Image (tube, coloured by chain):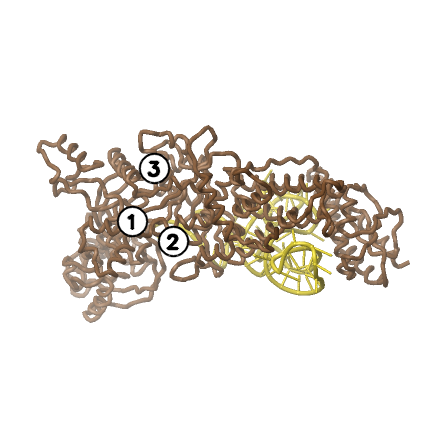
Chain colours: A brown, B yellow
Amino acid sequence: MEISKTYDPSESEDKWYKIWTDQGLFNSEPDDRESYTVVIPPPNVTGVLHMGHMLNNTIQDVLVRRARMFGKNACWVPGTDHASIATEAKVVQKLRAEGIKKGDLSREEFLEHAWEWTHKHGGVILSQLKKLGASCDWNRTNFTMNDNYYKSVINVFCDLHQKGFIYRGERMINWDPQAKTALSDEEVFYKEVNSKLYYLRYKIEGSDDEWVNIATTRPETILGDTAICINPDDERYTSLKGKRAIVPLINRSIPIIFDDYVDMEFGTGCLKITPAHDPNDYELGKKHHLEVINILDSSGSLNKNAKLFVGQDRFDVRKSIADELDSSGYLIKIEDHINKIGFSERTDAIIEPRLSLQWFCSMEKLSIPALENVMNDTVQFHPSKFKNTYRHWMENIRDWCISRQLWWGHQIPAFFYGDGKEDFIVAPTKEEALKKLNSQSDKQYNLDDLVQDEDVMDTWFSSWIWPIAVFDGFSNDKKELDYYYPTNDLVTAPEIMFFWVARMIISGYEYVDKPPFKNVYFTGIVRDQLGRKMSKSLGNSPDPLELIQKYGADGVRVGMLLSSPAGNDLLFDRNLCEQGRNFTNKLWNSFRLVQSWTVSDEIEQEESSLIALKWIESKVSQNIININSSYDKFRISEALMLTYKTIWDDYCSWFLEMIKPAYQQPIDRKTYDSVVLILEKILKIVHPFTPFIAEEIWQQLKPRNNTYIVNAKWPEENINDSTILDEFQNFQAIVMGIRNLRKEKNISNKVLLELNIKVNTNWSNIFDSLLLKICNLSSIVFTDESISAAYSFVVNNNEFFVPFTDSIDTKTEISKIEIEIQKKKGFLESVMKKLNNSRFSENAPKQVVDLEIKKKNDAEKQIKILEERIANLSS
RNA sequence: GGGCAAUUAGCUCAGUUGGUUUAGAGCGCUUGCUUGACAGGCAAGAGGUCACAGGUUCAAAUCCUGUAUUGCCCA
């Protein structure tokens, strides 16, 4: 049967994926075997696959497939995250396009739309992962809004409230005026922005013409000023002690206070204090018992407390108030100023610090075991440099604002029975809340008296229990949890180290008293060639499915991993996928070659084939040792490169060339059978990286009776002959010497050459038969004399001569050798410098000195050989 | 502003407690190769004063100090 010259992945990929899943090869149930567990970082339920997912999930699949081949019970749990704010934003947008405003809908109606949207778009991303070859147990697909999962989240909330970790409080939080919701600190990102610094003067109360000058970037907030603050060490302003100032335009009298918080260098050294609209001012306000005047409403417009500009947007007011301050003589000057401003991660709106009643989770105590067990490597970070970042964050951890003013998500299980701030009961259901309430109250309430808190929880408050909840860890049946938890490896991006990783560790210790995973592998961010983050708005992200179509899933997998050391960003280049595709093609053609041979039982195995087999056995074993060690250190791209070279260099370029029968000649049975065994080994080690082609060749190679490479055993290494590996290096050098010579002298590969060898050190003849074959030699002749009429080179102090076939160019030959001698002499000089230094020979360890002596002897010997050669040529 | 990293070939990166033949890989580049697995291939070659300046040491890409640049995290 004719096999295609190039490998076509499109057919075999879908075929094998279907068979694998139909056969249930990726499914896992607890049994006697050791478990190997990975939980997927759940992508947004309505998201689509991007390059970050590709990298992340390729790495997970490589780890999972390899573990499966080690005979472990591999379980990779897939699923999605409801992504409360992102999904809600999409639904609102979609409704708006249909002319429906969120405000016109009831909560129930809105949620119906949201579920409809989720069902329509949800899970697309998971089917895309199948294209990539992800070997997930799809029966276990989970979702953070599934009934069971929902209940787990609610129970955790109630439990933490019961334990006193969750509380309700008025705090200054990050407010997104566009989404009209609170955000956690982690959902705010800061950007440097060109803005203005306004210098204003406030009149001192009771004076005729005494002023205090302040500088502010937010003149609109003066309407909420309740003090002016000065550093007590600032001698410029000591006269202001005890005085009051008048807020311009509204003429409110405010105190002048003193606190060393104020930076004397910044602006004028006088700071206006607006406790309602700046977190630092808020803290100062609390300390000095200042009045708090909130002048903004939830959309960022001024409210009636502002007295002026009521109903206008904060940024419009900034312009108008500057004009008005100017015309009434309060504005001194405006300077350009660069400052950092917080933006909403989701809506990109400028964050407004806002005082509001929110739910918080107290983190300090909860985080203690989570910090400790990362620092002591119970949970290992790869690369370990991220431990520093982690520690820094954990040591300065702040309470987590977990409420969001949204509808799509887990509704906070707090039920209000009165108007007071504390008139609520926390319980999993309304019924339970009622029971609880009535048991502790004289008055008897009924269900209609209870109103559930409108807010939902932060999305991360559901995903932080992902590794527990996907194994039903909050139910009474702990069979799954006991077997699969702690999971083994988590593969994720460093950007969500605090959002997610740290919090999973915290919840793991709180609820299972064990870490959620043993290793965390941080991938880098996938960037484009210019180093920019890939994003929809830049349009610089390739479509993963198109890449898979073009290069094959195997090719893309290899392309993604070729240059992605842990924790470093990856500058994505589709040429890497091309390299991956070429690699699969190389593998394919090496299979075609083996497949094309006719096998003969009549002919004997050649000596050269026997040696070649002996060598490749040891070589592959040696490589497997190195590959295993790279995997153990989570150096995945290093493991890939070693695998790549095993196949391309060792197996294809050297081994197959060594055993290849002459054109249209058969191969002996013994050699052929051994080649098949080697090829099987090679398919196994490449399978985690390129599962599809590995399975395709595995199945075509011989009948497998419904067994698959997916479950094949990872090969064991056995180096039965290590000297052959050293000898091979000399052999390689000789082959290269002859190839070089052919190229330089323009001697075709078809011309038979005679190789003369003058043995100066020991010579093992095991590779002689292979030299004859690979270098196309007529014979190998051993000689005691140098041959003058010949090209020559030196390997391991043995001299090799190929007699001149035609015209003689001794001049070039001599100058070539002279260059060689110069090089060697330079080297010898650097060695001698060391050896002649008495402090070196006295202080350095003996083996280091011995090595230098050996280098010296070798170099001297080589120089001598070369000099003799010149003498010979010129005579 | 505070913290943490990084800087090695044209590009992307290795280089494991300082010493293994005057620094390695992949890609790219240059040159040569048309019958026999693969041009998505084969072979050979060029390319680096290891960011800079000091220091420690018999010995520094590797350790220390400073400078510059870049990235990340936090405020």
Q: Which mark is residue A84?
A: 1
Residue A138: x, y in percent? Answer: 40, 42
- Give the camera-side residue of A211 and A302: A302
Q: What residue type is disc 2 on?
A: Val
Q: Vertically, is A75 above or below A496? A: above
**Cα separation between marks 1 and 3:** 18 Å
- Give the camera-side residue of A268 and A13: A13
Q: Which mark is residue A469?
A: 3
Q: Residue at x 30, y 65 (%)?
A: A196
Q: Which mark is residue A48?
A: 2
Residue A743: x, y in percent? Answer: 75, 59
Q: Residue at x 63, y 49 (%)?
A: A590
Please give the chain letter of the residue carrying mark 2.
Answer: A
Q: What residue type is disc 3 on?
A: Ala
Q: What residue type is disc 1 on?
A: Ser
Disc 1, SS: helix
